[in-house]
Amino acid sequence: MGDPFDLVVVGAGTGGYSTALIAAQLGKRVAIVEQGERLGGTCLLRGCIPTKALLQSAAVMDTVERASEWGIKAAGEPDWSAIVAFEDSMVDKLVKGLTGLVKLRGIEVVSGSARIRSGPGVDVGDRGLETSAVVIASGSRPKMLPGLELTPRIITSDQALWYDRLPGSAVVIGAGAVGLEFASLYRSFGAEVTLIEALPRLAPLEDDEVSREIGRAFRKRGITAVASAAVKEVTDTGRHLSRCRRARTRDRWTRAQGGRGRPHRPRLRSGG
Ligand SMILES: Cc1cc2nc3c(=O)[nH]c(=O)nc-3n(C[C@H](O)[C@H](O)[C@H](O)COP(=O)(O)OP(=O)(O)OC[C@H]3O[C@@H](n4cnc5c(N)ncnc54)[C@H](O)[C@@H]3O)c2cc1C
């Protein structure tokens, strides 16, 4: 017989920890199982919070670039390791706060990968957690394109958050919220940015008007944005060239030439 809990929550992301906190507040005996090293899941550790910290640094950079408009002489240069340190400090602070709150509410944190069994019950390594209810809040992972493999220069948003340097140029695939954020912050830090979206407009889940406004703002900032372009293949050849073929325009190729002398850039081939 394992430990008896009223509720076992699998996953300590936003969904999991808020469920656990509320159940504990209602007087339930709760365990939360997390396979990662820290509580917080995607939002705290590799999503909302770190990206917002980076965007804050990017906003400061934008303000410095425009300082003369307010009569201030200023010149800024992004210090990537300091930017990442700021990002880390924001994440650490919130993870610490969450960990303290979970402890305060008497929630037991069990480290490891959960396996659900009938009963219901949850196994974590050799330990069995007996419970009358299980909530699965195991979240999601970045989705790779079919056949695409990570390399040091073909990365997802997870790697981008703690990349070892700022890219001189970047091709961002996907113009949903996450892609838009990275395109914007890379541009603020001086990179040449090409944004590629398979659907007919940027921010495809938002209203048309929002897409148009983002398109206008990005054009003004020198971000190349291509919609209706389904990326079929990304090849890391070490050449200074990225290409994509637009799905709707026969044989038309958009060339995204990188800017700042980064020696190796991915060549990006696509077809529609
Ligand atoms: C770059 C980026 C930026 C984002 N920005 C925003 C934003 O600004 N605003 C917003 O609302 N949303 C944003 N999101 C989305 C947001 O992060 C997710 O919607 C949210 O984290 C989902 O929470 P969740 O609890 O469902 O899953 P997750 O946060 O993914 O948590 C799932 C947890 O379950 C654990 N787990 C999985 N399987 C097991 C197992 N078998 N045993 C034990 N543990 C397990 C995982 O390790 C993980 O910690 C962003 C996402 C990304 C990637």
Image (tube, helix red, strand yellow):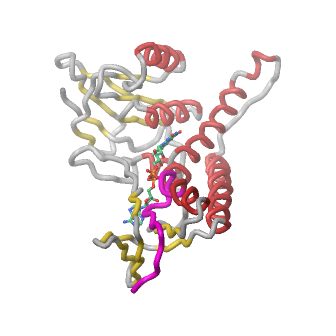
Say which of 256 and 58 sits in front.
58
Quadrant of the snapshot with the N terminus: bottom left
Q: Which of the 4 image quadrants contains residue 173?
A: top left
Give how far across and how far down residue 97 sits, in percent. Answer: 68, 58
- The image shows residue 138, relative to residue 125, as above or below, that is above
Say which of 101 and 176 sits in front.
101
Query: With 3 as the anchor, is 143 left or right in this view?
Result: left
Quadrant of the snapshot with the C terminus: top left
Give how far across and how far down residue 259 sits, in percent. Answer: 47, 31
- Residue at (49%, 74%) from the top-left corner? 110
- Residue at (33%, 25%) from the top-left corner? 255
Give how far across and how far down residue 18 sits, in percent. Answer: 54, 54
Say which of 47 and 27 sits in front.
27
Give how far across and how far down residue 270 sits, in percent. Answer: 23, 32
Asked whether residue 34 is in view, the answer is no
**Magenta stretch contains residue 81:** no
- The image shows residue 94, relative to residue 205, as above or below, that is below
Which residues make up the magenta segment?
Answer: 1-17
